[in-house]
Image (cartoon, rainbow, N blue to C red):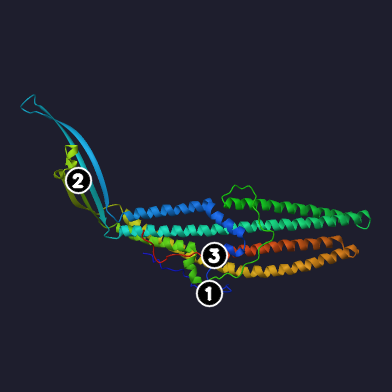
Amino acid sequence: MVSTDARPSVKLPANWAGATTNAGQPCTNWWQQFGSDELSGLVAEAEKQNLDLRIAAHRIEVADLQLKIANAGRFPSIDASLSSRREMRNFIGFPFGDGNLTSLSTTHSLMFSTAWELDLWNRIKAGVTSAAAEAEAVRADVEGARQSLAGRVVKAWLELTEAQNQVRLATSNVQLMESTVDRTKTRFERGIGSSLDYRLAMANLQQANAMVEAWRGAVATSRRRIELLLGRYPEGKMSGLDVMPAMPGVVPSGLPSELLLRRPDIVSRRFRLLSADARITQARADLFPKLSLTASGGTSSSELGDLIDYNARMWSFGGNLLMPIFNSGRLKAVVEQSRGQAKQSLFEYQKTVLTALGEVEMSLSIEGHLRERESRIAAAIVESELALKLAEERYTQGLELFVVVLEAQRRLLDARREQVSVRRQQLDNRVDLHLALGGGFDQRAVEGTKQK
């Protein structure tokens, strides 16, 4: 068998390499840390209405029914039958009469029968263990889908907020460009400026208007994306925030070893490894004899009214031993197939663990870089504002070319646009970090399954 206690070959460190603190546990409803009641309401609505999550939730019902079917094999089955038969027989060759005799008979029977397979080699028990582990894996899958859905809703909401902020910035840039166009036009008409300056200013104005429309299109797309996640008709009436939300505080990341018990996908893989391991036992048991006990009892009579007569009783009791003799190696092949599937499950479990560790470390590392990047952009905005003011003054005094003013405007616009974008990347990465840490998923039991 494949050991369900197997771990990846990578040694787990005592602490995360990029974590600032390991104290505490990630919260379950992590989206509340963004401080928006509207966002919390959207996540709650998505959990109720999202069709993908509804489909995932129904898989739990199917898995529970499969477990119920497997568990039923541990107990005897009891059946009842009521039958009635009328029979005619002809006897030919008798030395009296015309040599023919006809017999008519009617038989009624009421029977109860039971059968019970003795689980000598734990075949049935292994099937129950496999089904129970699969049911727990499906539950973990659904929790993972719930966390993933929350992440998609939050990211779509942040995307909408960024797009609305970019529209606001692009609109203010249009106003700046319009002012520049008026200034260059006045200077041209007075003969102190060139037509080239005016044309360049007009070109920049048209580009600024095009940017506004581009971001408005992004707003419309983001609104409909959220509405689809919520199970609503995509009519494009959602709204985001006027400004990007502030970064929440530091996330308590816990210990790397705790991730094995907390992330839904790791928990799911572990239960599926347990299920695959149980199927090996089930397949090996099919190589040995199956012993079943059978019993039946009831009444039989030619008169329907005598079926409840004790004197008409009949019963039987027996055993059935079924031993596979020749099956062209099919049963042994099934055993080897089960072993192969269990090894595959083991490697998938190890890969999932290693991938999860990598996702946490990458999110922790990126968060520091994004924070430093935002600080640099803020400093660039200050310098760009001063540079634009100086360029405009020198242009007015005839000391600089107009292209210097345009370049200063472009730098300031790019910096402001990037500031909003970087804040959204920070928040997106925070979402990724919460999901990588398991979203506060509380696994009930990993060292076994429930017998239902």
Q: Dot 3 lies on which element?
A: helix
In the rendered structure, which amino acid carries the disc numbered 3? Ala
- Numbered disc 2: secondary structure: strand
Q: CA distance from mark 1 to mark 3?
A: 15 Å
The mark that comes first in sequence, 2 or 1, is 1
- Residue at far right of view: 191
In the depicted view, which residue is nearer to us: 361 or 450? 450
Determine whether 245 is above or below 210 in the image.
Answer: below
Q: Position of residue 328 (x, y in %)?
A: 30, 52
Q: CA distance from mark 2 to mark 1?
A: 70 Å
Q: Left of 437 or right of it: where is 203?
A: right
Q: From the viewer's perspective, is residue 144 above or below residue 13?
A: above
Distance between mark 3 and mark 2 Cα atoms = 63 Å
Judge left or right: residue 130 versus residue 202: left
Image x and y of residue 208, in percent: 77, 54
Residue tagged 1: 15
* CB-based contact (under 8 Å), mark 2 and mark 1: no
Residue contact at pointers 3 and 2, CB within 8 angstroms: no
Say if residue 154 shows up in the picture: no
Query: What numbered label is drawn on residue 55?
Result: none
Q: Nearer the viewer, mark 3 or mark 2?
A: 2
> What's the residue at 58%, 57% (across, down)?
41
Q: What kind of residue is marked 2?
A: Gly
Instruction: Give the residue type at disc 1.
Output: Asn
Q: In this figure, which residue is indicated by the disc labeled 3? A: 436
- Circle nearer the N terminus (3, 2): 2
The residue sitting at 67% across, 53% down in the picture is: 219
Q: SS of the residue at dot 1?
A: loop
Image spot of residue 153 (x, y percent): 59, 57
Q: Position of residue 122 (x, y in %)?
A: 30, 60
Q: Which dot marks residue 298?
A: 2
